Structure formats: C-alpha cells, structure tokens
Image (tube, rainbow, N blue to C red):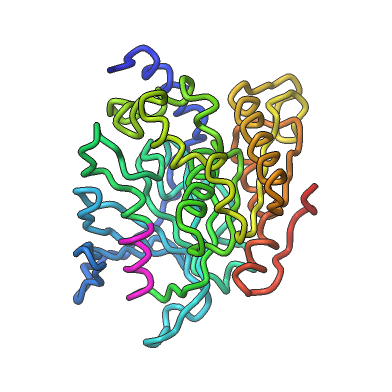
Amino acid sequence: MRRSTALAVAVAVGLALAGVGAPATAAPTTGVTAAPVRASDGAYVSRETVVAPRQVDLTIESPALGRAANVRLLTPDGWEQRRPGDRWPVLYLLHGCCDSYVSWTRSTDVASIPELRKVLVVMPEAGAAGWYSNWWNGGAGATPAWETFHLGEVRQITERGYGAGPRRAVAGLSMGGFGAMSYAARNPGMFRAAASFSGVVHPLRDASFWLPFFGFSGQDPDDLWGDPVAQRDIWAAHDPVALAKRLRHTALFVATGDGTAGGPFDAPDRTDALEALIHAENVVFVDRLRELGIRVTTDLYGPGTHSWPYWQRELHRALPMLLDALGTGRGVASQAAR
C-alpha cells in the first residue's frame, strides 16, 4: 500500500528536520585498498578516502545491502601508526532520518572533542530512512539489511583491519536514537552503553505517524516491519519499549526536549510538534525502564526543538557515561545531565 500524499509530506518535513547542510569541503586522498579487509559474508573495503585530519571514509561493498555504502571513521591518536593487535574502544554514532554518515562531523564539534582522541568513532551510512533494521519486505527479507551491515559487516571489518576493539558504545539522534536503543536491546552484551538524543524509542505508540517516514526513499512503508497491526510482533521485536528488559545490563542515557517554546537555541516563539511527540515516547520509555528497575540517566530538558544544537549539547552531556563504559575515564560534559 503506497501512501503518496503522506510520503510527500514526510519528504519535505524530513529534509527540514534533518538540518542538512553542505558537507565541509576538503581535499580528499583516495586509494583502492591493496588487500581488502573482508567480513565473513564477503563484504569488503573497496576504497579508503582521507577526508580531513583523523577522518577516513571506507567504501564497503555490502552483500547485506546489495550495493556499496560508506562509513566514516574518526580515528584516535596513534591510529595511523597502529601495529597488528592494536585495539581501541569503539563509539558508534548513528545519524538521523533524511541524512547521512557525514552528518556528525558536518554538524557538530565531534572531531575536536579531546576525550574522543582515545576512541575509534564509527559513523556508518544507514540510508536516508533505513531505520537500522533488516527490512521485512513482505516476509521475503533480502536487502536492505541494515542491522546485518552495521553489526556484522562494519563491525567485523573495523575489528579485522582498522583497530576496533571489543569494548563498544552506541549513540544516535532521532532515527539514530532508535537505532542505538534497538540495537543494544536486540543484541545484549554487544554494547556497554547506549545513548539516545531525541530518539524514536516507541514507534508502536505512533505507528501511523512514522509509517510515511519509513517510505522516505521511495520504498513501500510496509516493507520495513509490515503492518503495525497484522505484523505487530515484528514491530515489537524492534521497539525499545517492548524490548526494555533486555537493556538491564547496559548503561543508558536518554535525552529529549518537549517541543515547547523558550529553548536556548531557538527563536523565542518557536515550537516543534515532532519533538513533542518524541518527548511523549521517551517518557513512556523511561517509565518502563524504571518500572523494571533498570537504571537510566535522563536529560528531559524541557523547551527545545528537533535540531542539531541540542544534539551536540547532549553528546557532550552523555560522554561521561559513554566513556566510563568504554573504560577510557570520564569525559568532560558541558553541563551535568539533569
């Protein structure tokens, strides 16, 4: 079933919400890898591109996606001189809807945070609306299989050839906040910590709203998880609220505004209905975690919109928890989380 009108609205709204700007210009250094690093399913690195100091893009030929996709690495000190066996803790940063793997370095100060010079930061492509899932496709599966790409292919390739170690944390914004919590819950023990900034953490609550976003790139929205009634079990198998009990042994950070006016990075009268809806999902999620006796650090900071200045701030606020979980020592947060 196509939802053409809703999809058109979603496309327009999504581009506005993504905060997409022009990529930073740089003089890239590109080379085809002489001995490609491969994952178990045959995925391999076909190209490496140095785009800026400490920033390397990998082009991966992916069976899980049926095409090539990119991953940006923000490398730690000493990485260029690494020897076989050298390993660093890994922070996965996941992008939001309608955006791409360049968004974190384009729109935040992540590349200049001193505490991240001890960490390999992995920023993978997730499709404009891939939703960090292996798509159902009416029960046929096949491509795109984003979870397999990220947690199978990208993980294996970075561990086998690029210094990624076994200590992992994950964080993301909006669609990527969903990805962080869903991945951590669906794969207990893979990530020591997970952080969500304005994350879509309860899609089942607002299924009719999110369906158009699932079709942002032209897919049938039902191809992701199916119909939210007929295939409710598939939706629940990805929904962080439904999976909350599986997060018991993961350090958690949850942040969102409430969409009301008066946020420090907004015009005085600006409100945001999307952030208000996401705030309601996050309240349900936090309440569920606490009902289960699961510890979670929250920054439900009140007025604020669905936009990059808040996500950059929340990355800084989440860093102490993320770095503690990775064993690198506490980071410097810009303000203690409330």
* In the image: residue 23, left or right of residue 245: left
Residue 278 image point, x, y percent: 60, 31
* In the image: residue 197, left or right of residue 184: right
Residue plotted at (41% across, 49% down): 101
Above or below residue 201? Residue 84 is below
Residue plotted at (38% across, 59% down): 151
Q: Quadrant of residue 26?
A: bottom left
So how many labels did they put on this image? 0
State the residue in front, 169 or 45: 169
Residue 4 image point, x, y percent: 32, 15
Confirm whether the magenta stretch covers residue 270: no
State the residue in front, 111 or 331: 331
Q: Quadrant of the N terminus?
A: top left
Residue plotted at (65% across, 29% down): 280
Residue plotted at (66% across, 46% down): 289
Q: Which residues are magenta?
A: 151-161
Residue 211 image point, x, y percent: 41, 24
Q: Quadrant of residue 268?
A: top right
Confirm whether the magenta stretch covers residue 153: yes
* In the image: residue 112, left or right of residue 11: right
